[in-house]
Image (cartoon, grey):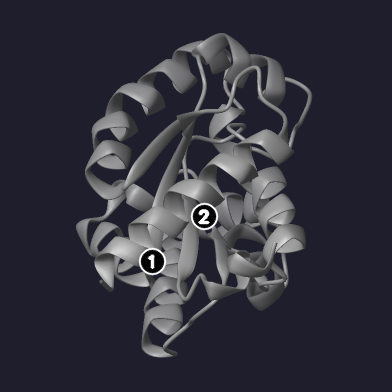
Amino acid sequence: MSDIKKLPENIVLVGIMGCGKSTVGRELQVRLGYPLVDMDQEIERTAGKPISAIFAEEGEGRFRDMETRLLRQLDASDCRRRIVSTGGGVVGREENRRLLRSLGYVVWLDAPLSVILERTGKTRHRPLLQTADPEAKLRELLETRGPLYQETAHLKLDTSGLDSGEIAAGILECARYFFSHRHA
């Protein structure tokens, strides 16, 4: 366990809503002892309202501006030894993709559409799924964002069938290898 503390950089989690970013982020936080920056929670805290209210009152564009501003702050602060859990649409902007890679080791948590539907079907706090056909919306988001996640991520992990501990262990092994060879 002592070699975990040698990991000098951030681990950044990207992926569609329901893929497990927040859950895996909390697991990595426990294992590493690094602070967790959950971007959605941070934006809600700063804005003083839930993301659904930001979308309803100010629009998606304003929310995306908030994401970009937060990424710039993290990048400018020389943020180190953090777990960063992003919102699903953060990769939509080229600047964000560049900032994410600059922050650290980017892991794309993925899962089949059926798994995402099962995980997201129980909640009402996902503004993009407040539609007559959430499955069609998710399919559209996956098609649009998939190539952007691929472009941004150093690692792609299918989270279906794995618990958060197994996923975190896999991420840590890959991140150790990535950072040790990058700084060699």
**Image quadrant where one finds the N terminus:** bottom right
Please tell me in which quadrant of the rendered image residue 148 appears. Answer: top left
| Above or below: residue 70 compared with residue 142 | below
Q: Which residue is mark 1?
A: 104
User: Tag 2, which secondary structure?
Assistant: loop
Question: What is the x, y in percent for residue 112?
Answer: 50, 15
* Depth check, front residue: 116 or 31: 31
Question: What is the x, y in percent for residue 110?
Answer: 48, 29
* Depth check, front residue: 107 or 123: 107
Please tell me in which quadrant of the rendered image residue 82 appears. Answer: bottom right
Q: Give how far apart the Cα atoms at labels 1 and 2 are.
A: 13 Å
Closer to viewer: mark 1 or mark 2:
1
Amino acid type for the residue under numbered disc 2:
Thr
Question: What is the x, y in percent for residue 83?
Answer: 58, 64
Q: Which residue is mark 2?
A: 86
Q: Is residue 156 visible?
A: yes
**Dot 1 alpha-carbon crowd within 10 angstroms: few under 14, some 14 to 19, many 20 or more:** many
Residue at image position (24%, 33%) is 147
Q: Is residue 87 visible?
A: no
Residue at image position (61%, 37%) is 167
Residue at image position (48%, 69%) is 10
Give the mark nearest the N terminus, 1 or 2: 2
